[in-house]
Image (cartoon, rainbow, N blue to C red):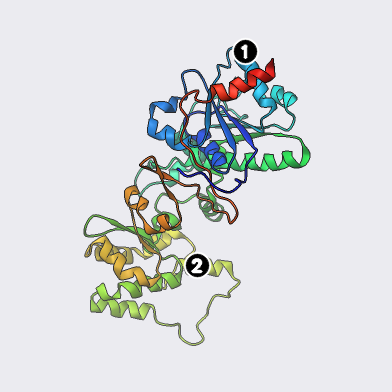
Amino acid sequence: METCPTNPLLRGVRVLDLSRLLPGPFCSLYLAQLGADVIKIEEPGGDYARASAELFEQVNRGKRSITLDLRQSDDVARFKALVAEADVVLESFRPGVMDKLGCGYDTLKRINPRLVYAALTGYGQTGPYRDRAGHDVNYLAIAGVLDQIGAHGGPPAMSNLQIADLAGGALTCAIGILAALFGARASGVGSFVDVGMADGSAALQVMALAALRQHGAALPRGCDVFTGALPNYAIYRCRDGRHLAIGALEPKFFRALLTGIAPALPGWVNRVVARKLAPRPTGAPSAAPDDPQAAARAKLQPFGKTTTDPRDARRMLAPLRWLLTLLFLTRPRDAWVELLEAADACVTPVLTLGEALDNAQLRARGMVLDDGGKPAFNLPIFFDNACATHGPSPALGADNDGVLGTLAQTMR
């Protein structure tokens, strides 16, 4: 991988990363790609994720690795010496573990008052669940997210995107670290950053919470605007077994969709659609441009059916869903993509990951990197005066001599 030729934005920031597996390392990966010097501190046996080499290599690119056993007093002393010169400590142990090792925040901030100490855990440092074990699916379940995912009438569904680990945890923690670093630079005083993945996942539920506030409860799976209530915001199977994603939510996009598929519709259907899309008669009431409730109703009346409840929209628009379901089964996916490409109707093919890696848009954005002949993703943030830094993932203890050797000289 190429090294960024410009000065990275986090140049000079040193991160001591004690975290393992996925959430913490993904958080520090972003910091490393932004230019921070991330030193991955592993037990002599290494991060558990090393057993899955492809996973480990993805989330630990561009970091250094040293081995310390914090159950040994000599290694605790080495760690504290590193803390004295560090900007950030990141750990993902259960609450209280670092205190038992003599390396808790209260101890470390006396060594380095400007230290940013980030603890990334499942349920945070407080509350009745703080000591419980868990994984992504558990945090999503507790946060109410899992109940929102799945088909209408079916059970909650699993996702291969670890929403709690990555969005609720890793990225939330990265934001907290960057904010605390900014504060430390301004005040000279560091912070304890407490991030719980269940908390972060709960906070992502903007649309579900909006429904609860409006209707008194989150809507059942498949019954909200973005989970399948509307036939114009849905996924459809095509003749070849592939799928189309339809996002024609606003009336203008819905009209564009119907206009785009018109050549494939029987004549009688086109006549019905034309009547439904006819302009309002002169003098017909229209929504004021600053009326948010009217705008919300407009989103739920693509066929002239007015309601503020997506559950009613699902029932009233069932004939349209039936029509579109049958229609999209008449042609292969790519034929529909070609037909609708110029319609500007928010229609895209559902790609496999392999197809996405070859997608012209992701390639044009520089999102796909060559990592020793294997694909990797770039940092999805682009700056006009800096670029992401990249490097290979480290072998276990690869930097013991460089980091600990130098440290030994200063500790004499």
Give, as a three-letter code, the residue at label 2: Arg
Position of residue 120 relative to residue 8, above or below, is: above
Q: Residue at x 47, y 22 (%)?
A: 46
Q: Which residue is mark 2?
A: 297
| Residue 251 rendering spot, x and y as whole percentages | 44, 71
Residue most toward the bottom?
Answer: 282
| Residue 177 rendering spot, x and y as whole percentages | 63, 39
Instruction: Name the quadrant containing residue 302.
Output: bottom left
Position of residue 243 relative to residue 13, above or below, is: below
Position of residue 80 relative to residue 375, above or below, is: above
Residue most toward the top?
Answer: 73
Residue most toward the right?
Answer: 187
| Residue 354 rendering spot, x and y as whole percentages | 32, 48
In the visual, does 18 lie left or right of 99?
Answer: left
Q: Image quadrant for the N terminus?
A: top left
329, 15: nearer the viewer: 15
Instruction: Name the quadrant containing residue 291.
Output: bottom right
Q: Which dot, 1 or 2, sits closer to the camera?
A: 1
Crowding at mark 1 (Cα within 10 Å: few <14, some 14-19, many 20+): few
Q: Which residue is mark 1?
A: 74
Q: Image quadrant for the C terminus?
A: top right
Position of residue 379 relative to residue 318, above or below, is: above
In the visual, does 284 lie left or right of 268?
Answer: right
Q: Is residue 99 visible?
A: no
Q: Spatial distance from mark 1 to mark 2, Cα to Cα?
A: 67 Å
